[in-house]
Amino acid sequence: MQFFIDTANLSQIKEAYELGILDGVTTNPSLMAKEGIKGTEAVIKHYIDICKIANGPVSAEVIATDLDGIIAEGKALAALDKNIVVKVPMIKDGIKAIKWFTDNGIQTNCTLVFSAGQAILAAKAGATYVSPFIGRIDDSSWDGVNLIEQIAHIYRLQGFQTKILAASIRNALHIVRCAEVGADVCTCPLDSILGLLKHPLTDIGLAKFLEDAKSMK
Ligand code: E4P
């Protein structure tokens, strides 16, 4: 399973890359706004800055919701860097645009996916990635990881090539469960990635080893 970081914060992206386990980055308009990015030029510069740090796919989301607008915006984003993946919402014109991008060699990430039916449509349109939002599903008392498992089963059975990118990750357990049920990629906040490091027995064990090592001096 690949690890992407789900942020537009440059220092968090750097920190995650320094761990040596990061494969890519996802952003969305909310994450960009959180960094105080305003205006088209600033948005473009920020994507370029992310691509300079990231040595892998960087999802950049379109704002347009009509076919021509999505295509125009997606083409401009894709021209910024070879690693840009155009993130397109799961709407009717979004599906048409994904098909257009697929036919024109532009990578896509179909976002705001909450059902297996939507994931089938994204795959049929040739999306490079499909992003089911598991945390938001959990927030509404459904089971987000179950959806990842269902999509993985369908894609395997039907031979779809679209990669399942588990999004809206809330904690380290989400990451483990997504790995268990066959997600291809998990896009996570830095805290959830660092949460994987934690185990009290590791801390207790290390303290004891260091204490015993002192007696060997
Ligand atoms: C990433 O691709 C998604 O936009 C993101 O994971 C959504 O996460 P949230 O539900 O925490 O906003």
Image (cartoon, rainbow, N blue to C red):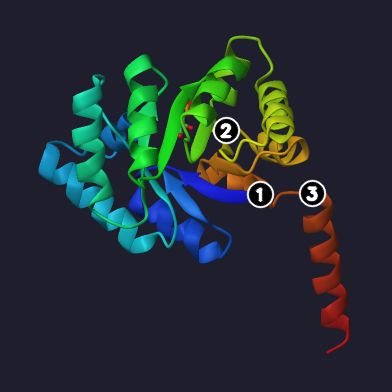
Mark 3 or 2 closer to N-term? Answer: 2
Looking at this view, is 21 or 66 the one in front? 66
Q: In the structure shown, which secondary structural element does the residue marked by tag 1 occupy?
A: loop
Percent position (x, y) of residue 11? 37, 55
Specify whether tag 2 is near ligand 1 (CB below 8 Å). Answer: yes
* Residue occupying image coordinates x 67% and y 34%: 174
Q: CA distance from mark 3 to mark 2?
A: 23 Å
Q: Nearer the viewer, mark 3 or mark 2?
A: 2
Mark 3 or 1 closer to N-term? Answer: 1
- Along the horizontal axis of the image, is 119 left or right of 68? right
Pointer 2 with pointer 1, Cβ within 8 A: no
- Along the horizontal axis of the image, is 39 left or right of 59? left
Q: Nearer the viewer, mark 3 or mark 1?
A: 1
**Residue neighbourhood size for the residue with mark 3, other residues' Cα within 10 Å, grouped as few (<14), some (14–19), many (≥20):** few
Q: In the structure shown, which secondary structural element does the residue marked by tag 2 occupy?
A: loop
How many numbered marks, from 0 up?
3
Q: Which residue is mark 2?
A: 169
Percent position (x, y) of residue 161? 59, 41
Q: Which residue is mark 3?
A: 200
* Residue occupying image coordinates x 60% and y 47%: 193
Looking at this view, is 157 or 70 the one in front? 157
The amino acid type, in three-letter code, at marker 1 is Met
* Residue occupying image coordinates x 65% and y 21%: 144
- Along the horizontal axis of the image, is 12 left or right of 113? left
- Along the horizontal axis of the image, is 117 left or right of 122? right
What is the quadrant of residue 217 in the picture? Answer: bottom right
For this orientation, the residue located farthest to the bottom is: 217
Q: Which residue is mark 1?
A: 1
**Residue neighbourhood size for the residue with mark 1, other residues' Cα within 10 Å, grouped as few (<14), some (14–19), many (≥20):** some
What is the quadrant of residue 133 in the picture? Answer: top right
The amino acid type, in three-letter code, at marker 2 is Ile
For this orientation, the residue located farthest to the front is: 103
